[in-house]
Image (cartoon, rainbow, N blue to C red):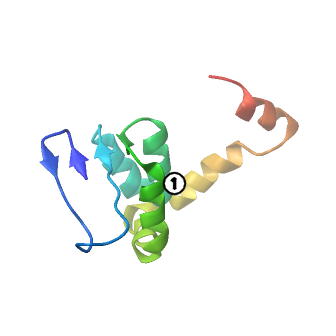
Amino acid sequence: MVIDESERHVFGTAGSHLLGEIQIHDAAAWGLVASKGSIGAGEAYIHGYWSSPDLTAVVRIFVSNLEVLDALEGGLAKLGRPFVQGLHGLNRNTRKGSEKNIAAP
């Protein structure tokens, strides 16, 4: 994991066949992951708060370590789940909701 080009952290087992790199561009990524778990990680990626030169490898690492992914769903993410579900309810897939969801920003 590369943070602001100044820090590098390595996780995992030496010699593993799965290698991935995550580059953190904005500290806001941490808040989204802490508050929304894997959904927040996805949102942070979409916002450009983190990136990877090989996103497929990163996804493969997460899939092969589902217990790590499950851990993201605890803590603050668990507390924030009712709020996120409430927001999701506002974007229901009704005719009007669909028009809003599809409309370009």
Q: Where does the C terminus fall, quadrant-wise?
A: top right
**Circle 1 — which element?**
helix
Q: Amino acid at mark 1?
A: Ile
**Residue 18 location, quadrant:** bottom left
Q: Position of residue 66 (x, y in %)?
A: 47, 74
Q: Residue furthest top?
A: 105
Q: State the residue at coordinates (69%, 43%).
A: 90
Q: Is residue 51 left or right of residue 15?
A: right
**Which residue, as the protein is rendered here, is positioned at the far right?**
95
Say if residue 73 shows up in the picture: no
Left or right: residue 2 versus residue 82 is: left
Q: Residue at x 42, y 73 (%)?
A: 65
In this view of the protein, which residue sits in the foreground, 13 or 49? Answer: 13
Is residue 66 something one can see in this rendering? yes
Count of picture labels: 1
Residue 103 image position (x, y, % from top left): 72, 26
Q: Is residue 60 left or right of residue 84?
A: left
Residue 71: name its quadrant: bottom left
Please give the residue where the numbered disc 1 appears in the rendered image: 39
Q: Is residue 77 above or below residue 45?
A: below
